[in-house]
Image (tube, rainbow, N blue to C red):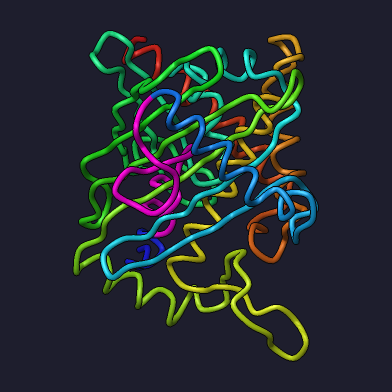
Amino acid sequence: MKSIGQFLFGRCCAGALLLVLVFSGGAGLAAEPGTGSERALLAKYNSIRPRLEKNQFGAPIYLESSEAEASVQVDMYGVVNHPFDLVKEALQSPSNWCDITPLHINIKACTFKTGTNPPQLTLYSGRKYYQPPSDAYPIRYKFRVVSQLPRFLDLNLDAEEGPMGTKDHRMVLQAAPLDGQSTLLRFSYVYSQGAVARMAIRGYFSTIGRDKVGFSVIGDRGGKPRYIEGVRGAVERNTMRYYLALQTFLETLKYPDNQVFEQRISRWYDLTAKYPKQLKEIDKNSYLANKRRERAKQLSLQEKEGG
């Protein structure tokens, strides 16, 4: 039997933490549609540019997070070396998100429905090991293209309910061109947690999860960085996993259909391996084998549900 902590963080935090960028109702960029949001995103880029160029990640990535009594939010910014038009076309498709999100170690499957208004994206969140979708927790997101302009893209994914009494899961992606060959992304996630979820989280991080950390440095311990712990650290880890899935998806668009899946799962694992303290869970061969089995289950599930 799985503990309440394992259930919550194998299914809740992983599946809940998704996709790219702004959340209204939280700290961060302005949420008004159109060119105001584009200007806000680029203004943020100018303010954090030195930290994108030199940081602990060894990559053009910047992360900030905050925690309140009933909610946690992570905002992540990154520069990808792909033209904006390519990024915009690829990321506004719900079906493509079902190629992106299952790269995450805890996402067992993703299905989409485009016949609804708005389209629906369901993520099946579970353990780090192999698990069929029927044993995972389904989180149903409404997929909305908030703004699609010549130089700006804004996507929202909203789910009213999640595991263990969590609610108001929201993921937003924003993108804007920096030059002809690179694009700025902002990825953010926020959700609310009730009393039951808070109790489970505290129990988990006082026992099984006490050694798990995130990426924000909050001090010094014996001459080494002291990283954020607890639920905020968990959200940071999972946000990074999703961001690296987005990066992987864009990098592998060049491969033919009969090679692209294998290229993606291998590349995602290699990118996460750069941060073993935070993201190491299982060895590469096990991850690849699990994802191949889960992919087969996803394709079968999608066929049953329809597009």
The quarter holding residue 120 reads top left
Residue shown at 65%/41% (left/top)? 78
Residue shown at 39%/37% (left/top)? 124
Please tell me which residue lies in front, 66 or 28: 28
Residue shown at 34%/24% (left/top)? 143
Q: In x, y percent, where is residue 47?
A: 62, 50
The quarter holding residue 82 reads top right
Please tell me which residue lies in front, 46 or 268: 46
Q: In x, y percent, where is residue 199?
A: 26, 74
Q: Residue 50 magenta-drawn? A: no
Give the number of callouts.
Answer: 0
Which quadrant of the rendered structure holds the C terminus? Answer: top left
Q: What secondary structure predominates along the stretch shown in magenta? A: loop
Which quadrant of the rendered structure holds the N terminus? Answer: bottom left
Left or right: 55, with 201 as reference point: right
Q: Residue 30 magenta-drawn? A: yes
Please tell me which residue lies in front, 282 or 277: 277
Q: In x, y percent, where is residue 131?
A: 46, 42
Residue shown at 27%/56% (left/top)? 192
Left or right: 282, with 97 as reference point: right
Which residue is situated farthest in the bottom direction here? 222
Q: Is residue 235 above or below residue 122?
A: below
Q: Is residue 251 visible?
A: no
Q: In x, y percent, where is residue 254?
A: 76, 14
Please tell me which residue lies in front, 3 or 182: 182
Q: Is residue 266 above or below residue 229?
A: above
- In the image, the segment drawn in magenta is 9-33
Q: Is residue 286 above or below residue 83?
A: below
Q: Is residue 16 above or below residue 304?
A: below
